[in-house]
Amino acid sequence: MIAFKDILTTKWDYLYPSGNTHEMDSKGVSIDTRTIQQGNIYIAIKGEQFDGHNFVLEAFKKGAYLCIVNTEWAEKNRKKFKGHSVIAVKDTTKYLGDLCLNYRRKFNIPVIAVGGSNGKTTAKEMIASVLSQKYKVLKTEGNLNNHIGVPLTIFNLNEEHEVAVIEIGTNHHGELKYLCKILEPNFGILTNIGREHLEFFKNIAGVARAEGELFDYLKKSSQFGFVNIDDSNIIAKAVDLKKKLTYGFKGRVSVKGKLIGLDKLALPTFEVSYKGETTKIKLKVPGQHSVSNALSAASIGFQFGLTGKEIKKGLETYQAYSKRMEVVNTIEGYIIINDCYNANPDSMVAAINTLEQIKTKGRKITVLGDMAELGSTSKKGHEEIGKAITNSKIDYFLSIGKDMEHAFNIASEQMPNAIHFQSNKVLIEYLQFLMEKEDVVLVKGSRSMKMEEIVSALSINQRKLN
């Protein structure tokens, strides 16, 4: 078993009391005293909401054997941790990354980095489901995909794991470059390049540069990439990537996908072909766009030596991840498409298209909230959603949020059942009055809109799609 004391670097300013850390016993890393366990190393991270330094004494009381703190704080608070072991460093967040790199290097296993604008969490889950048919897999839980979440995921590695599937996310330039530095992936995939975080990236070219930092790393370190040939921006970023496997639905690719059709809930059936072998697969995730994520997982499965039968089982047993095109049947007989984890123009249009593809005798209702972090493109992006709604066969459009009102203004010109709301409470009350048996409602918006409140109110009596 790998001891966490062995990954401590000597890049500290002070060690209290002075001595050899190798004499200490450690059993993991924690940044949260609510979940800390006996023998953990506690790292005090200063975040937007809380400063971990305020909980150092609590960490010791709960059994932390060592706390890592910022030097400035340590110099001011020496008396508070008298009798305890403390390491003081210039930047605890950076030190967390250093520990991540040291720990990752203890394991000689494939590490797959999963990035992209849309669908990366779903793709990560599908990839893990496929690979778990043959290997012991560590995967990112939820979307712990930033400079804090990635190290915490890596610290869960143990000797039993044979492969790691790690989601990496970005909303600023340089973030994926840093994550690759502390993760050292030897495989990487970008699901797609879309209009995400435009407040910071400005345009699609900016997104491509930021997401492309993963492929930049793979090229520089001579590692392996999986290339979505259907995305022109990914093709451009994959130039000079020598080790790669291509996949897609068009043109000449190593792993070829073919959509066969959608059932009444828009659950897709598709074929995947590789080296003369064709496998037919039916997903439990709605929407044509879901097939691209499945095809990426299949490509990785083939590269890792899985058979078409094993890949089929991995994909067909995969259930939609929470709040990501999650199909929920209610006792009342209506269906909720819970896609309220996040939103940008591309994912919003894809969700609307999926709702259109569902076959039902009831009505189709969209409940849409603001798309955050679009910056100067926000009005245009929301107006695009209004046009998409207008040109669709959606029966009701219920909007909420200052920015989504732009979409309402466009749609309401031609759509009589378009209504804008000022609060979730009033919107919920209207929906509870409106919803009838066999209706299908799509709920989607950015995290800041708390759209999950609407889903929860509608689905008190519910069951997930089997």
Image (cartoon, helix red, strand yellow):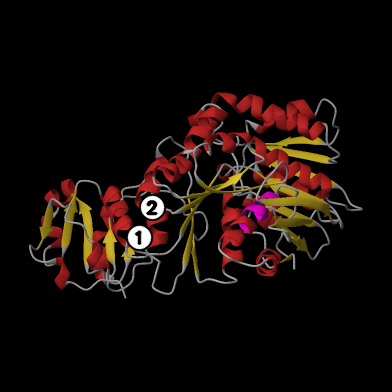
Residue 119 % position (x, y): 61, 48
Reading the image, the residue beneath label 1 is 104
As rendered, which of 51 and 93 lies closer to the eye?
93
Marks 2,1: beta carbons within 8 A: yes
**Mark 1 Cα shell of 10 Å, populated few (<14), some (14-19), many (≥20):** many
In the displayed orientation, state which residue is furthest to the front: 276
Please give the name of the residue rendered at 65% of the width and 45% of the height, measured from the top-left corner: 424
User: Disc 2 to disc 1, how far (Cα)?
Assistant: 8 Å
User: Hey, what amino acid is under mark 1?
Assistant: Arg
Left or right, 85 with respect to 117, comes to: left
Between disc 2 and disc 1, whose residue precedes? 1
Please give the name of the residue rendered at 87% of the width and 52% of the height, measured from the top-left corner: 359
Reading the image, the residue beneath label 2 is 184
As rendered, which of 27 and 255 lies closer to the eye?
255
Please give the name of the residue rendered at 30% of the width and 49% of the height, measured from the top-left corner: 93
Q: Is residue 266 above or below residue 109?
A: above
Left or right, 155 with respect to 257, comes to: left
User: Hey, what amino acid is under mark 2?
Assistant: Glu
Residue 131 % position (x, y): 57, 66
As rendered, which of 255 and 423 lies closer to the eye?
255
Residue 84 visible in the picture: no
Residue 311 visible in the picture: yes
In the displayed orientation, state which residue is furthest to the left: 18
Based on the displayed image, in which of its 4 quarters is residue 303 positioned? Answer: bottom right
Identify the magenta region.
Answer: 290-297
**Quarter of the image with the C terminus in it:** bottom right
